[in-house]
Amino acid sequence: MKILVIGGGNMGMTYAEAMAKSSFLKKKELMILDTNPQKIEELENMDIFDVHSDLKTCLPQADIVFLAVKPYHAEELMEDMKPFISEEQMFVSIMAGVTINSMQESLGMPKVVRAMPNLPAQVGKGVTSFTASDEVSRVELSTIERILATTGKAIHLDTENDIDASTGISGSGPAYIFYFMQSMIEAALKMGFSDHDSRVLVGQTFEGAIELFNSSDLSPRSWMDRVASKGGTTRAALDSMEDNNVRELISEAAHAAFERAVELGKEYENTHA
């Protein structure tokens, strides 16, 4: 099996490096393509990929092709790819808003997977949701899942609507966490803590809470009840959040991301119809 990653940006590199470190691919089985001379030099110096700068030298060899470019480059890239592809190949897109149908039409190929990664994939703690066209077999889906899981966990979803919904939870989710962390850091600074101590207090608190959550089947509400005693400090904080409708605001934010993901897909299809 040979895999080609097109695009040496953040997410392309994240998946390429994770695959390179996995046990089921050798160096010559993993190709990466970029057209930026500085990026090509960087990739060659890493000495873990078969590096290319021209589609015709690598695309015909690939069994699976990852498209990891910005969505506004998608149409031009897929047009350039068409002379070098075949129906046996699978195409995995991590381009936001580019639908399976639009890729099938642009490439003229049936086997397309659409995936939504998130930023923690860069440290092996990501979650990637994915769905595929009907032409992708169960065996092929299993292979894709193994590849995507090299960056953390992979979840197969039934429809593209589910992919858009996952954008509102996991895709955009890290930013919600960072927003909450930033708010807590700013609160700590106002209480008189140093920058360093504020970061440690907040960072370790989040890391510890996540570890507790992952170590058991208890719900977040159950953990809140364990921390918060009647009339105590934690209950005062939680009551303040409830009074200010923080729960509803977070839900509305996630739905806003979901709705925007749907809009992006429609905008892309309308632009390239």
Image (cartoon, helix red, strand yellow):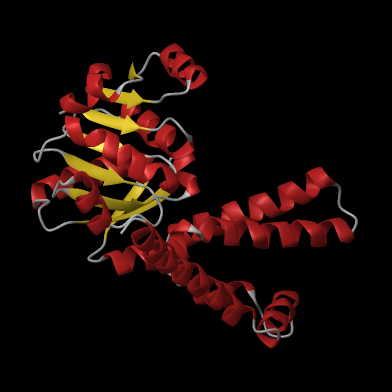
Residue 80 is left or right of residue 236, and the answer is: left
Tell me the residue at 21%/52% (across/down): 105
Residue 6 in the image: state x and y as whole percent. 34, 32
Q: Is 200 drawn above or below residue 252 in the view shown?
A: above
Residue 251 in the image: state x and y as whole percent. 53, 77
Q: Is 110 drawn above or below residue 43 in the view shown?
A: below
Tell me the residue at 36%/44% (across/down): 74
Tell me the residue at 46%/65% (across/down): 169
Residue 260 in the image: state x and y as whole percent. 48, 67
Q: Quadrant of residue 234?
A: bottom right
* Quadrant of the rendering where the N terminus is positioned: top left
Q: Is residue 237 visible?
A: yes
Q: How many marks?
A: 0
* Quadrant of the rendering where the C terminus is positioned: bottom left
For the residue pair 3 and 99, the one nearer the viewer reads as: 99
Q: Quadrant of residue 14?
A: top left
Residue 3 is left or right of residue 194, and the answer is: left
Q: Residue furthest right?
A: 192
Q: Quadrant of residue 121?
A: top left
Q: Is residue 25 visible?
A: no
Residue 269 is left or right of residue 234, and the answer is: left
Q: Is 57 drawn above or below residue 74 in the view shown?
A: above
